[in-house]
């Protein structure tokens, strides 16, 4: 049951009984099971409450850094690691924000942030059609940030950052350990074996991670900015936590979700994220170029053997949106047309590889779609404007339409060539729940990649020392032998 409150009169207007029906019940049928909990069973996730306990065959895995970390933090927020230098801040709406990013003394980005996220639900029965969270605009990601635990949320030698938020009385309050900074092994960075000499050179890829985690009611989201030794940046999100559920009658199934436990219907929904990338590629005068690779029909003049394909580059002259297209290998290069790479002759830049995910499925005329116009395209290119930070607009709480978001910014039609531009990267997770998502779902991981393209004159990580980790040991052969009588 849901009590409906008149906020002005501070009175309960009515109490809505939620439908507990399934596929054979009409949309507005009065299906309200009276003893809905009788067929439900418990589901625990706290380790000490698990009926069968936890696994006993998992050995300890430690991340050891006997010489300490390779990063340095000064002036409270200035981070220096390898050839990277940037600042970290935190605010109640966006959580962790990265500023003034440089690599080897060269400017790469002015500001990186998670701008917005909307979670629309697909249950058409009233009142669920109104179920749509804006986790940053409504809840305030920074307000909901976790106090990160040593040795759990981050491993190794860790630097924690505190923040100050405003409490319910308007007073400042310290929010401890809301950001963790640590190094992480990412596997092989680069390798080559000279087949003539047999000499192999291999380096490990190490990344610097700036991470924060938010809990909004039932869901957890892990956000991380990852800086690598080759000049690349990944912005990553991991979705976990408990799926949002409603009751369902015994023996019934539903078009609106999946039964994940007796009496528990996990509703179908989407998570759609928007990352705001304010680039500064060797300065603030930048241009976004759409690059595609097209097949060329066989012809005697340019493609007599049929193996040639054409690379097409189109500058984004005015504010616009675009969508991912993996069939054309569509990427978006953010370049500085005033500075050329001395090797290739191309403009120096970074490329954005947009995840080709499903976007908002709600009908364009629906309130869900009108409130989240940003969620309908993968990439938006706008001209920088002061305080234009939020893809879904500044005010999302109980909104009926997106106002002052990226759709309005594009509608201005600003010139975006060789000027101060902003790129908004949007991607979605369509979550049709599985039984395996219950009682807590395993992490669902998505990343947005920023990679240098003709920014350097060679592989920037060519000087990373070859790796030969002396702490690694070989497993004794006796532990890996097949059991008697088994393959």
Image (cartoon, rainbow, N blue to C red):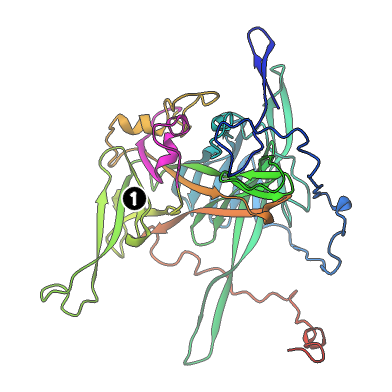
Q: Give how far across and how far down residue 341 sits, in percent.
A: 32, 59
Q: Is residue 74 magenta?
A: no
Q: Give how far across and how far down residue 116 sits, in percent.
A: 52, 36
SS for dot 1: strand
Which residue corresponds to the image point at 74% horizontal and 55% vertical from the top-left? Answer: 157
- Locate residue 472: give its quadrant: bottom right
* Residue wearing tag 1: 335
**Foreground pick, 223 / 108:** 223
Q: Is residue 380 magenta?
A: yes
Q: Give how far across and how far down residue 86 sits, in percent.
A: 55, 45
Q: Is residue 34 above or below residue 53?
A: above
**Foreground pick, 378 / 363:** 363
> Quick check: 9 left or right of 126?
right
Question: Farthest top residue?
Answer: 9
Quarter of the figure with the N terminus = top right
Q: Which residues are magenta?
A: 359-387
Which residue corresponds to the image point at 65% horizontal and 45% vertical from the top-left? Answer: 266
Q: Is residue 458 above or below residue 126?
A: below
Q: Give how far across and how far down residue 431 sits, in percent.
A: 57, 49
- Locate residue 422: give its quadrant: top left
> Quick check: 475 left or right of 163?
right
> Quick check: 436 left or right of 295?
right
Which residue corresponds to the image point at 89% horizontal and 52% vertical from the top-left? Answer: 48
Which residue corresponds to the image point at 54% horizontal and 59% vertical from the top-left? Answer: 228
Please count the marks in the image.
1
- Locate residue 68: give its quadrant: bottom right
Question: Farthest left residue?
Answer: 301
**Foreground pick, 475 / 464:** 475
């Amino acid at each position: 049951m849901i009590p409906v409150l008149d906020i002005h009169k501070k009175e309960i207007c009515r109490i809505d009984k939620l439908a507990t029906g399934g596929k054979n019940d009409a949309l507005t049928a009065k299906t309200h099971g009276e003893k809905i909990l009788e067929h439900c069973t418990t589901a625990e996730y706290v380790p000490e409450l698990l009926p069968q306990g936890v696994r006993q065959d998992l050995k300890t895995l430690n991340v050891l850094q006997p010489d300490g970390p390779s990063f340095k933090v000064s002036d409270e927020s200035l981070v220096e690691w390898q050839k990277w230098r940037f600042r970290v801040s935190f605010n109640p709406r966006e959580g962790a924000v990265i500023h003034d990013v440089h690599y080897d003394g060269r400017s790469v980005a002015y500001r990186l942030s998670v701008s917005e996220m909307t979670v629309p639900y697909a249950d058409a029965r009233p009142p669920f059609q109104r179920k749509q969270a804006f986790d940053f605009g409504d809840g305030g990601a920074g307000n909901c940030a976790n106090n990160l635990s040593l040795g759990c949320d981050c491993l190794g030698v860790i630097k924690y950052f505190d923040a100050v938020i405003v409490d319910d009385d308007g007073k400042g309050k310290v929010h401890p350990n809301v950001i963790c900074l640590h190094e992480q092994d990412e596997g092989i960075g680069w390798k080559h074996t000279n087949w003539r000499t047999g000499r192999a050179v291999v380096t490990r890829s190490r990344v610097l991670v700036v991470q924060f985690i938010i809990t909004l009611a039932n869901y957890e989201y892990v956000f991380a900015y990852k800086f690598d030794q080759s000049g690349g940046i990944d912005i990553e999100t991991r979705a976990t936590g408990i799926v949002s559920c409603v009751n369902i009658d015994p023996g019934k199934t539903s078009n609106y979700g999946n039964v994940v436990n007796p009496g528990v219907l996990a509703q179908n929904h989407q998570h759609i994220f928007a990352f705001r990338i304010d680039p500064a590629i060797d300065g603030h005068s930048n241009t976004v170029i759409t690059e595609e690779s097209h097949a060329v029909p066989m012809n005697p003049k340019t493609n007599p053997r049929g193996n040639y394909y054409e690379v097409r580059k189109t500058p984004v002259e005015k504010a616009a949106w675009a969508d991912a297209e993996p069939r054309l290998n569509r990427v978006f290069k953010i370049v500085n047309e005033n500075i050329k790479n001395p090797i290739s002759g191309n403009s120096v830049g970074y490329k954005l590889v947009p995840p080709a995910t499903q976007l908002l499925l709600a009908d364009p005329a629906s309130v869900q779609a009108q409130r989240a116009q940003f969620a309908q395209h993968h990439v938006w290119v706008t001209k920088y404007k002061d305080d234009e930070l939020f893809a879904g607009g500044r005010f999302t709480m109980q909104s009926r339409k997106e106002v002052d978001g990226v759709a309005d910014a594009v509608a201005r039609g600003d010139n975006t060539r060789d000027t101060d531009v902003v790129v908004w990267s949007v991607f979605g997770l369509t979550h049709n729940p599985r039984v395996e998502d219950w009682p807590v779902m395993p992490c669902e991981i998505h990343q947005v990649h920023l990679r240098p393209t003709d920014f350097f004159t060679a592989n920037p990580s060519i000087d990373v020392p070859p790796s030969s980790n002396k702490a690694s040991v070989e497993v004794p052969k006796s532990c890996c032998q097949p059991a008697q009588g088994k393959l």
